[in-house]
Image: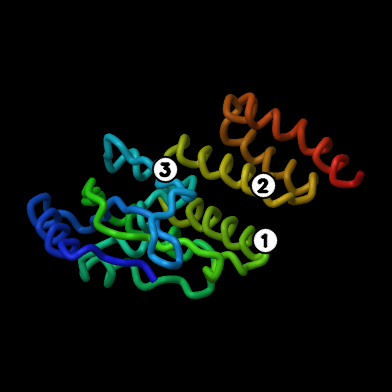
Amino acid sequence: DDVWLPAKLELQCAFMGANHLDMCFCDYQTIDESGKNNSIFETVSFSNFSYLKLRRKILTGNFILGSASSVMVKKTIISSVGLFDEKIKWGGDWEYWMRIIFNTKYIGFLQKELVLIRFGITQVQSTLNSEKRLQDVLFILNKALISYDLTRNERISVHVTAFKTMYAYQSSFKELFKAYLLVLKVGFVAAFSPDLIWLLLKYPMRKLKNAI
């Protein structure tokens, strides 16, 4: 459903060759189902790109701009990391980029809008129930903890992301508090950050509001 602009392949191939990259992604614009510019959906800013910044960000969400439609990857990298995990119905591309990012540091961002990303109400991901989406996100985050040699700060980021995701998907307070204890275990300072404490305090109020 997405659209490549005519020079996409040429420009990305040249960029990858000039910078000796294993993977490259580019900027994008959003369009609606009819092909008109869709300003409702905000693009993700990625100024001052660096591999270390990408490595940190990918542990908290899919920060590959344009996702699969914008990415070019060398065949040797695909052979090394394998294919998409078909068990993951939501976030399969996010998990795949994470695999590549922790396999090679030779990744670049071409700051040119070369893809038109189509957002619409008929997208497959919008039909997935929230329970399945939560399961997939937590699976991806847990896989990151198990599979990659993360720094302490990176592990903290993963646990904080899991906590915030569980809050967003209205997990039980028991499960949410267990996730909070994991944050506390790996990062005392992070556990007492104002935003996490606020979510813990806000949770009972949200449940009470929903019950009224």
Q: Which mark is residue 56?
A: none
Is residue 77 shown left or right of residue 162? left
| Mark pair 3, 2: CA separation | 19 Å
Figure quadrant of the N terminus: bottom left
Report the mark closest to the observer, 3 or 2.
2
Q: Position of residue 15 (x, y in %)?
A: 13, 53
Q: Position of residue 172 (x, y in %)?
A: 79, 50
Q: Nearer the viewer, residue 123 or 25?
A: 123
Which residue matches tag 2?
A: 168
Figure quadrant of the C terminus: top right
Which residue matches tag 3?
A: 57
As drawn, the residue found furthest toward the right would be: 212
Element type at mark 2: helix
- At 21% from the left and 51% from the top, the residue drawn is 106
Amino acid identity at mark 2: Ala
Element type at mark 1: helix
Amino acid identity at mark 1: Ser
Label 3 or label 1, whichever comes before in sequence order: 3
Which residue matches tag 1?
A: 130
Q: Residues within 10 Å of mark 3 (few under 14, many from 20)?
A: some
- At 62% from the left and 37% from the top, the residue drawn is 183
Q: Residues within 10 Å of mark 1 (few under 14, many from 20)?
A: few
Does residue 18 sit above or below 123 in this rendering? above
Element type at mark 3: helix
| Mark pair 3, 1: CA separation | 23 Å
Q: Position of residue 141 (x, y in %)?
A: 53, 53
> How many tags in the picture?
3
The coloring applied to the image is: rainbow
Is residue 59 shown left or right of residue 47? right
Label 3 or label 2, whichever comes before in sequence order: 3
Is residue 17 shown left or right of residue 29? left
